[in-house]
Amino acid sequence: MKSIALALIIGAKGVLGLGLSTPILRFTDKGTFQISVFSDLHYGEAEDLDWGPQQDINSTRVMNSILDQESPQLVVLNGDLITGENTYEANSSHYLDQIVTPLVDRNLYWACTYGNHDSQFNLSRQEIFTREKRYPNSLTQSMVPSIGYESGVSNYYLPIYSADKSDKTPKVILWFFDSRGGNEFQNTDKNGGRVPIDDFVDQSVVDWFSETRDQLNKVYHKTIPSLAFFHIPVTAMLAFQESPGPNAHTEPGINDDVPLAEQGPSDGSFNYTGQDKPFMKALVETKGLIATFSGHDHGNDWCFKWNTTLSEMDIKGDGVILCFDRHSGYGGYGSWTRGSRQILLDEKTLGKQTDTWVRLEEGSISGAVTLNATYGQDRYPAVKDTHNPNERVTAVSSDGVLVAASSAQYLHIQNPATNERLCTFQHDLPVYSSASSPNGKLVVSGSPDGSDLVASGTEEGPIRIWEVDGSDDTPTEHNKQRVISVFFGPNDTVASCSNGQMIYTRKPDGSDLQSYQDTIPVFSVAFPPAGILASREGDWLVKIWNPESGDAPLLLQGHGTSVDSVAFLSDDQLVSDSEDK
C-alpha cells in the first residue's frame, strides 16, 4: 500500500494524485472557496409512470434554484445519485447526464461519492464512474484498486490551492470515500435474490487513506487542513444521536431519522460488528480534519463535535465535527423541504473556523452555524422542520367512498366526491402511505417517527391502527426492521414486511398471529380474500406463503427485472407489477 501512496504524490511542486490535465482547484481572489453539496438525489424512479420523471424534473429544479442563489467553486454529489432498484440495465447510468446538466450549463466542477442505491442489479457504480468521466468538469477519481466490490470506486482526494499561483502547497485536502452498500451488478444468489455489498469503508481504503495522508504531511512538511465526504454516516453519529442527542440550539438541524442508519448494517442485510471502527479510528487520527459530511438519512441535517468517548464505543473523538447533508432530491423517501448543504472555507481562518448552512429550495437559509473550537457550546436558532406541502392519495376504501391522503405529517380521511375532510391524524414525521381495511372502517398509516407503521418506505416503528371515526385505542408494538409494506387481509388482519427478512401478521388489536422468516429482504406483501399470503422478494421473485405454517411452498419466477409490488384480485388471482412486463 505504501507504493500506491507514494505513486500518488508527484512531488511537492506538482499536482497531487491527479492527471496533469485535471483542473486545479483554487481559492478565489477574495480568499474563499465554497462547496455546494447535493445528497440523495435519487434519479430514475418509476420512469414508466408520470410521477417518476416528474420527480427528476423537480430535483433538477432544486439544483438550478440553489445554484442560482449560491456561487460555489465546487459541487459535491454525495451519494445515491440514482435509485438503481428502479432502473433498466440498458440506460441506468444515463441518468448521470440529467443529473449533471445544471453543473455543465454553469461550467462548474464537481466531485462524487457513490451511495448504496448506486449499486444495484441493473446499475453499477463503475458504470456511473465511466459515464461521468466523459465530462471534463468531473473531478471524481478512483485511486484505490479494487478486486470485485472490496474497495468500491469513489476513493480519492482533491487538493485546493491558494489563489496565489506561486504557492505550490495545498491549502486544503478534500477526501472522498466510498461507503459502498447496495447489491452486486447482474448477480444473484442460489435463491435468485440479490447479493448485498458490504456497506462500510473497506480496510484497504483505510490503509490507503492513512498512508497517503502521512505522505502528504511529510512531503509538504505540515499538517494540511482537510474535509471528508462519504455517503453513509459512521456509527459515532448514531452513538451521539442516542445519547446525549443533538440539542436544538447547539447542534441545530432536523433529527427525524431515529435511529439513523450507520455504516455496517444500514440496509438491514448485515449485523453491526464494528465494521467501521478502523475508518473512524483513521478519521480521529487525522490531524487537521475539520469536518466530515454524509447523507443517507434523509431526515437528518445536524452536525456534532466528537470530542468524547461516546456510549458503547471505545474510540474517543479528537474534536472532529461530523455533519449530515440535506436531502436534495425528490426521489427517495421523505417530504422534508429539499435543500443543499453549503460549506465556506476562508484562507485566513482555515483550521480555525468554517461556516456552513443549508440553502433550501425556496430560497431560505436553515441551520447556519460556524464549525469552530466552541461548536457544541455556541447557541443558534432552532431549525424549523418543514415539509413539501403537496398531498398524495395513499389509500382508497373498497367502496370508493373514502380516501386517505397524506400531507407532511398529517393523514386526512376525506370524501373524494365532496372533498369533505372527515378527520385528521397527526404524526411527528411525514406520512408516506397507508392502507384501508376491506370494510373501510380502519386505516393503517405511518411515518418514521416511531408512532406508527406506513404502507411503504418507512423507518422502524410500531403498528398503529386508526379508527376512521377519529379514535385511536389500538395497542402499538415495535418492529425490529425498517417497515416497507403493510396490507389489510381477511378479518382485518394486518400483514407487514421489512427490508430485513421478516413478514408479520397481526390481529387488529395488535397481537401476533404468525411470523415468516426469509433469507432475503421482503419489499411488498398482499392478502387475497382466501387468506393465503404473497410477498415480493429480492429482485424478481414472488413467494406464496401458508399463513398457518409460515412456510413458502411456492416460488414464482418470470419477470426479467425488479418486481415493484404484488396484489390479489377479488377472485384470488395474483398480479405483480414489474418494470419488464
Image (cartoon, helix red, strand yellow):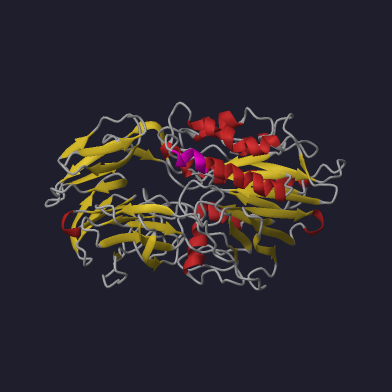
Q: Is residue 173 left or right of residue 435?
A: right
Which residue appears farthest toward the front when viewing the image? 418
- Residue 372 x, y percent position in the rendering: 70, 65
- Residue 531 x, y percent position in the rendering: 14, 50
Vertical comparison of 494 with 221: above or below: below
At 59% from the left and 59% from the top, the residue drawn is 322
Q: Within the magenta stretch, is there residue 53?
A: yes
Instruction: In this rendered view, identify the residue nearer to me: 18 or 128.
Output: 128
User: Can residue 270 be seen at all in this image of the molecule?
Assistant: yes
Magenta portion: prevailing SS class: helix
- Residue 125 x, y percent position in the rendering: 51, 35
Specify start and end residues of the magenta stretch as a single range: 50-55
User: Can residue 145 be seen at all in this image of the molecule?
Assistant: no
- Residue 453 x, y percent position in the rendering: 34, 60
Residue 350 location, quadrant: bottom right
Vertical comparison of 91 with 555: above or below: above
Instruction: In this rendered view, identify the residue nearer to me: 109 or 51.
Output: 51
How many marks are shown on the rendered structure?
Answer: 0
Q: Is residue 224 left or right of residue 195?
A: right
Q: Is residue 506 left or right of residue 330?
A: left
Q: Is residue 316 left or right of residue 73?
A: left
Position of the C terminus, as image quadrant, is: top left
Q: Within the magenta stretch, is there residue 507?
A: no
At 29% from the left and 49% from the top, the residue drawn is 501
Position of the N terminus, as image quadrant, is: top right
Instruction: In this rendered view, identify the residue nearer to me: 167 or 407.
Output: 407
Residue 561 location, quadrant: top left
Instruction: In this rendered view, identify the residue nearer to me: 14 or 462.
Output: 462
